[in-house]
Image (cartoon, rainbow, N blue to C red):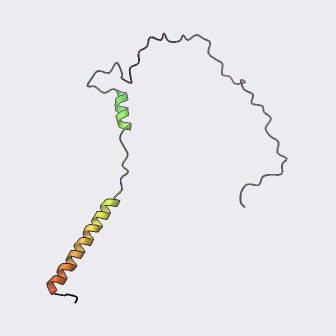
Amino acid sequence: MEGKNPGNGTDNPGNGGDNPGNGPDNPGNGGETPGSGNNQPNNGVDPTNKPGTESSSDSKAAASAILPITATDTYTILLIGIVISLAGAALIYLQKRKTGMTHS
């Protein structure tokens, strides 16, 4: 069985020096006021956008909606193979018919 050696058991765990709340981040000072609650939903429509014009967010959404080209040629190659096989079978049939070769 391959893998890491589990060690000899003498390794000590970390010292736990990372206590929560010791970082330099301080909570906000409370200077921001919450919204008034009078905002109406716009259902994703940009109210500054006039009809008939595209905003930059619309063009970005349209650009990201383009699907990548992932098609393969499998069915095309299969169709070409079938056509060639049928053409070969037809040529063999016509050649046998022309020369009068019959199997009896």
- Left or right, residue 92 beside residue 64: left
- Left or right, residue 26 beside residue 90: right
Kindly identify the residue that appears in the image at 30 percent across and 60 percent down. 76
Query: Where is residue 78 drawn, in percent x and y?
Result: 32, 64
Asked if 101 appears above or below 8 in the picture, the reply is below
Query: Where is residue 10 drawn, in percent x and y?
Result: 85, 47
- Left or right, residue 75 beside residue 34: left
Would residue 41 be counted in the magenta stretch? yes
Kindly identify the residue that appears in the image at 80 percent across and 35 percent down. 15
Segment tinted magenta in the rendering: 21-46
Task: Quadrant for residue 81, please give it.
Answer: bottom left
Q: Main secondary structure of the magenta part?
A: loop
Query: Where is residue 53 drawn, in percent x and y?
Result: 28, 25
The residue lying furthest to the front in this view is: 104
The residue lying furthest to the right in this view is: 10
Q: Foreground residue, 16 or 83?
A: 83
Would residue 27 be counted in the magenta stretch? yes
Q: Foreground residue, 74 or 66?
A: 74
Number of residue marks = 0
The residue lying furthest to the bottom in this view is: 104
Asked if 91 appears above or below 7 in the picture, the reply is below
Q: Quadrant of the N terminus?
A: bottom right
Q: Quadrant of the C terminus?
A: bottom left
Query: Where is residue 86 drawn, in percent x and y?
Result: 24, 71
Asked if 10 appears above or below 19 in the picture, the reply is below
Task: Quadrant for residue 25, please give it.
Answer: top right
Kindly identify the residue that appears in the image at 78 percent across and 33 percent down. 16
Kindly identify the residue that appears in the image at 15 percent across and 86 percent down. 99
